[in-house]
Amino acid sequence: MTPEEIRALLKGVADGSVELESALERLKDGPLRQDELAFATLDHHRHLRQGLAEVVYG
């Protein structure tokens, strides 16, 4: 999700046009999405929160 899409979603929650649970589900598929693998949890949006992606080798 882009910042504009997140902003629109939050405005929808604030004005009542989007239910909170619906917004939460949309966020889980967007910026809060993580993939669980047998050996790692991939955080696809870390660069949005931290400014830098992370790669761990080992």
Image (spheres, rainbow, N blue to C red):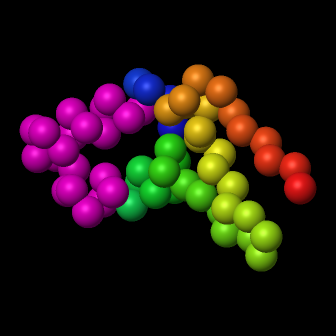
Task: Say left or right for 46 vs 31.
Answer: right
What is the chief secondary structure element of the magenta stretch? helix
Q: Nearer the viewer, residue 17 or 9?
A: 9
Task: Say left or right for 18 vs 2.
Answer: left
Task: Say left or right for 22 vs 13.
Answer: right
Q: Residue placed at 59% from the left, 58% from the top? A: 34
Which portion, as a residue range, is magenta?
5-24
Residue, far front: 58
Task: Say left or right for 51 vs 49.
Answer: right
Q: Is residue 16 above or below residue 35?
A: above
Quadrant of the drawing holding the C terminus:
bottom right
Residue, far right: 58
Q: Residue placed at 80% from the left, 47% from the top? A: 56
Residue 24 figure quarter = bottom left
Residue, far left: 15
Residue 25 figure quarter = bottom left
Q: Residue placed at 74% from the left, 64% from the top? A: 40
Residue 26: x %, y % from top left = 42, 54
Please tell me whether residue 17 belongs to the stretch shown in magenta.
Answer: yes
Please tell me whether residue 34 belongs to the stretch shown in magenta.
Answer: no
Residue 13: x %, y % from top left = 18, 44
Q: Is residue 45 above or below residue 43?
A: above
Q: Residue placed at 38% from the left, 35% from the top? A: 6
Residue 57: x %, y % from top left = 87, 50
Q: How many numbered markers are drawn? A: 0
Residue 14: x %, y % from top left = 13, 39
Residue 45 figure quarter = top right
